Image (cartoon, rainbow, N blue to C red):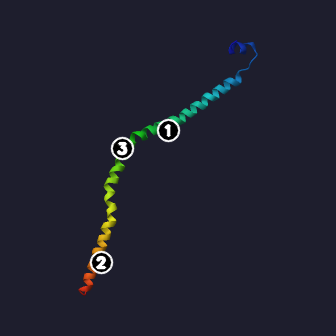
Amino acid sequence: MSTAALAQAGGADLTGWYVGFAIGIVVVLVVVALVVPILVLAFRIGKQAPGINAALSDAERHTRPLADLAVTIDHADVITAGLRRGRQRLGG
């Protein structure tokens, strides 16, 4: 016997099933409405990621010489100390 035949026979009340089914559909639609924007944003970020990575690589390459700045400062300190000693020896 089908569900409709049982319902017509008066043996089964399917109102609870219909309400539960409707609530389930609403829950699924809400989840989809929340997940789709997240997926769209993730797709956009994924498309921009190679450009961002290239820009960061360029920035790293352009700022790499700054690591040698400490060596330059050390050499400048040695030079200025030598100049100071020379000035003191000359009486200035």
Answer above or below: position of 16 versus 41.
Answer: above
Label 2 and label 1: CA atoms lie apart by 61 Å
The amino acid type found where label 3 is placed reads: Gly
Q: Badge 2: few (under 14), some or many (20 or more) residues near its Cα, within 10 Å? A: few
Instruction: Kindly identify which residue carries mark 2.
Output: 81
Instruction: Kindly identify which residue carries mark 3.
Output: 51
Q: Badge 1: few (under 14), some or many (20 or more) residues near its Cα, within 10 Å? A: few
Q: Name the front one of labels 2 and 3.
A: 2
From the viewer's perspective, is 6 left or right of 66?
Answer: right
Q: Nearer the viewer, residue 48 or 70?
A: 70
Instruction: Kindly identify which residue carries mark 1.
Output: 38
Which residue: 31% across, 59% down?
65
SS for callout 1: helix
Question: Which residue ends up furthest to the left in the rendered image?
Answer: 90
The circle drawn on residue 17 is none
- Residue 92 can be seen, yes or no: no
Q: Position of residue 17 (x, y in %)?
A: 68, 24
Answer above or below: position of 73 versus 35.
Answer: below
Circle nearer the N terminus (3, 1): 1
SS for callout 3: helix
Q: Name the front one of labels 2 and 1.
A: 2
Circle nearer the N terminus (2, 1): 1
- Residue 8 can be seen, yes or no: yes
